[in-house]
Image (tube, helix red, strand yellow):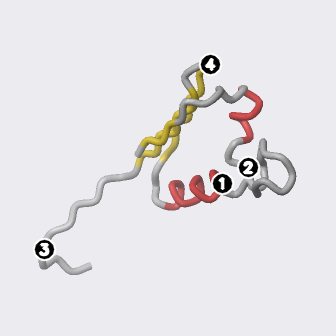
Amino acid sequence: MTVSDNGGEMSNSRLARVFEPFYTTKEVGKGSGLGLSMVYGFVKQSAGRFEIFSEPKKGTTVKMYFPRFFWQAGARN
């Protein structure tokens, strides 16, 4: 799954902290900073992985990779 924006790029120092709980670049009272840390936890719990890219004048892209799951009708777990 890929999520992208076309806003400004994130600096390397911000990218290094982007998944920290309560880290935010927003003003006080404008957000908690829990969004990406919660998504990070879900992806890791699902045995997935992340890639995050940020480029000037192109924005930021977050790619989330999840393992494949094959299901057969009638199969029991």
Q: Residue at x 48, y 42 (%)?
A: 3
Task: Please state which of the two labelled residues, at mark 4 or mark 3, is closer to the viewer.
Answer: 4
- On residue 69, the disc is none
**Distance of mark 4 from mark 2, alpha carbons?**
23 Å
The residue where tag 4 is placed is: 56
Assess whether mark 1 and mark 3 are in contact (beta carbons under 8 angstroms).
no
Seen in the picture, residue 34 relative to 3 is either above or below; the reply is: below
**Local SS, label 4:** loop
Residue 46 screen position, x and y as percent? 46, 60
The residue where tag 1 is placed is: 37
Q: Residue at x 56, y 35 (%)?
A: 52
**Distance of mark 2 from mark 1, alpha carbons?**
6 Å
62 with respect to 13 (left or right) = left
**Local SS, label 1:** helix
Chain-order first, disc 3 or disc 1 = 1
Q: Quadrant of residue 77?
A: bottom left
Seen in the picture, residue 51 relative to 59 is either above or below; the reply is: below
* Residue ranking furthest to the top: 56
User: Residue flagged by tag 3: what amino acid is it?
Assistant: Ala
Chain-order first, disc 4 or disc 1 = 1
Task: Please state which of the two labelled residues, at mark 3 or mark 1, is closer to the viewer.
Answer: 1
Assess whether mark 1 and mark 2 are in contact (beta carbons under 8 angstroms).
yes
Assess whether mark 3 and mark 4 are in contact (beta carbons under 8 angstroms).
no
User: Residue flagged by tag 4: what amino acid is it?
Assistant: Pro
Chain-order first, disc 2 or disc 3 = 2
Residue in the foreground of this view, choosing between 2 and 66: 2
Chain-order first, disc 2 or disc 1 = 2
Q: Quadrant of residue 13?
A: top right
